[in-house]
Image (cartoon, rainbow, N blue to C red):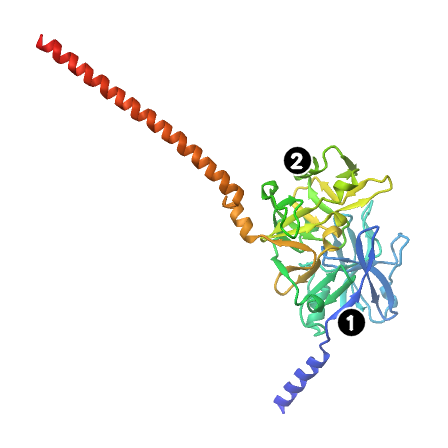
Amino acid sequence: MKMALIILFISISFLLAKEPQSISLSYNKDLGFYTIPVTFGSNQEVFDIQVDTTTSETWIPSYKTTLNVKKYNISKSSTGIKTNKTFEVEDEDGDVRGKACYDTIKVGDITLEHFGFVQVDEFEYQFKDYPQGKLGLGFKQEHGEDFNFIGRLKKKNLIEKEIFSINAASKEMVIGELPSEFKNQLYTTCSLAETNDLDDEYRQAWACELTHIFFNIDKNQKNKNLDLAFEVDSRVTFDSAYPYISVPKRHINDFKNYYMNTYFNNTYKEKRDGDATYFVCTDESLVKKASISFIMEGYAYIIPSEKLFVENDDGEYEMLVRFYKENDNIFSFGAPFVDFFTIVYDYEDEEVGFYGGERIEMTKEWYDYMNENTPEQQKAKKKRMYIYAGVGFFILLIIIALIYRNKHLRDRRYQNDNRIYQI
């Protein structure tokens, strides 16, 4: 009887486990991020909230806020529970603060009971972020498993794996499994980097090691001058809610020397937007040839010009890279990267994966380059060896000549001394 109950329980659990969920996303092209409809509470109130991979808490505005946005009153939900715990959700574009709550939510065809989120009462002064709420999909969770959206789905046996992906081409989020259309295609991963030592807004993010940057290569490997690469020795976060690629300002001179001055000559200008610096270019023909490549774990991930530049109202081409003065040497990959590669976020294997896009497997080339074994460097090395050998041989001849001359002088002096002695 006991064994029969166990088999019945396993069978029911298997039947309850759902197939991977594919949920349509809306993409705000002007702001450069994705939103998703989420239903909250017994009254089934729908909030179009932002998909954010850098924060772990989900939040929506409370009825107490003064902002002109849709608001939520959990007291009117028969399934809602409000606590007295105050949570602060920190973000680079503005922090929010509110009470921890529990309620039933629905995302796509998935209904999740007793999910923890924040009902926001206060927005930071000069709040610059999306005010209608966020679905927190960060890697690290500060407030326990009840607030971890993907973890709760797995625990309730609603998905097979703690994994999700954002498909830039179809504008979908797949929850619980790898995207089926990419299973037989090239798939690369990078292991997650530690974030505990970073500022608060980065600690919950998905991060990888970023080693080098170089410019204007192509996936056919016809233009791959590794001598133009420069080392950054940094980390990068993958931010689905960010419209740019952010770069620490310490690297701005490298971008000027290796990229702007090399490829754009005098056809670019430097501009400022608040505390950020960015470049605009005026020559469309040069812009169309430009790309930037980021090296992570032996792969060069290429951002082509059509994802890297946007034409502004003045007819100039604005580069979607922002340079900030930051304490941490952290890059953030927003829309130019997230919209070009399908990114897989894997909690269980602690990896970030990439489908599609343009990338070059460079493990051997990069190893050779770092060990001075590229063909160009081999030629230069042979040339140096020939020069050194020639100089060494010349010096050796001089030394031999000096030794011979010195010996000849000693022999003559000896002969002269013998003559004097005989006399």
Q: Percent x, y for residue 1?
A: 63, 92
| 64 sits to left or right of 102 | right
Above or below: residue 273 compared with residue 13: above
Above or below: residue 36 compared with residue 411: below
Disc ID at residue 110 = 1
| 50 sits to left or right of 248 | right
Q: Is residue 96 visible?
A: yes
Q: Can residue 196 be seen in this view?
A: no
Q: Specify the farthest residue to the top.
A: 423
Above or below: residue 103 compared with residue 294: below
Q: What is the C-alpha distance between the residues marked 1 and 2? A: 51 Å
Q: Specify the farthest residue to the right.
A: 68
Instruction: Give the residue displayed 19% in from the left and 14% down from the top.
Output: 413
Q: Percent x, y for residue 18?
A: 73, 75
In the image shown, does 173 or 287 lie closer to the viewer?
Answer: 287
Q: Specify the farthest residue to the bottom.
A: 1
* Helix, strand or loop status at disc 1: strand
Q: Percent x, y for residue 87?
A: 75, 56
Instruction: Give the residue displayed 78% in from the left and 38% down from the top.
Output: 283
In the image shown, does 399 or 52 lie closer to the viewer?
Answer: 399
Task: Say which residue label 2 marks.
Answer: 257
Which marked residue is nearer to the observer: mark 1 or mark 2?
2
Q: What residue type is labelled 1?
A: Ile
* Helix, strand or loop status at disc 2: helix
